[in-house]
Image (tube, rainbow, N blue to C red):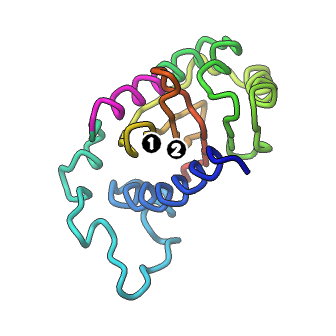
Amino acid sequence: MSKISHRRAFLLAAVVPAMLVAGCAAGTDSQAMKGEASPASPTGMESPMETGTGMESGSPMETGSPTGTAGAAQARSAVQNFFDVLKSGNVDKVVNSFSDDAVVAIAGKATATGGSAIRSLYQDQFKNKDVSKATHTIEDSRDLGQQYAVVRARSKQGGDAYRELFLLADQGGQWKITDLMTNKAG
């Protein structure tokens, strides 16, 4: 496994639980987001809610405004651009939103790693669904140091609602999606 893959795996291990806690704090209507399927914190480990680290009512996490430095805003912009090109149905532009070694795990589909697998995944999506009518809402964006950021979003397509978690990296001044995970939102 490369250094970059190790770094991304570590970031995901640190970020995903925090973003799930944030989703639970946002008070949505899905079972997992309500915390009903979430285990209790181990003894001696406090959640961000208990420690007052920005998950309180009215905090940037809850209101959906970008936090951190310019990286969070740039990552948010990159995800919005991804949503725009996704709605256009342009596979080349969709694939260009991702890093060369990106990993995409869309609910109900096999995980796609790398440009050609991501291209196939989205070509299949475009054949089977009218993506032009989908709606997308970015709920939060956060810096993970100077080079990485995470963005949490929701999308609706037809009768299906999805939660999405994006991990992005600044690659030579351009923010690229390195990991995308989605699941159905109840």
> Residue 159 at x, y = what percent?
60, 36
Residue 71 is covered by the magenta coloring: yes
Tag 2 residue = 165
Would you call the spot at circle 1 few (<14 residues within 10 Å), some (14-19), or many (20 or more)? many
Horizontal placement of 167 versus 5: left or right?
left
Residue 124 is covered by the magenta coloring: no
Vertically, is 52 above or below 131? Answer: below
> Residue 143 at x, y = what percent?
36, 42
> Residue 125 at x, y = what percent?
74, 27
Horizontal placement of 150 versus 69: left or right?
right
Tag 1 residue = 150
Q: Which mark is residue 97?
A: none
Q: Residue at x 55, y 57 (%)?
A: 10
The residue at the far front in this view is 3
Mark in the foreground, 1 or 2 = 1
Determine whether label 1 and label 2 are within 8 Å by CB: yes
The residue at the far bottom in this view is 43
Magenta span covers which residues?
A: 69-80
Would you call the spot at circle 2 few (<14 residues within 10 Å), some (14-19), or many (20 or more)? many
Q: Residue at x 33, y 29 (%)?
A: 73
Q: Residue at x 54, y 27 (%)?
A: 176
Q: Mark 1 belongs to which amino acid?
A: Val
Q: Residue at x 51, y 35 (%)?
A: 168
Q: Judging from the image, what secondary structure is the residue with disc 2 in?
A: strand
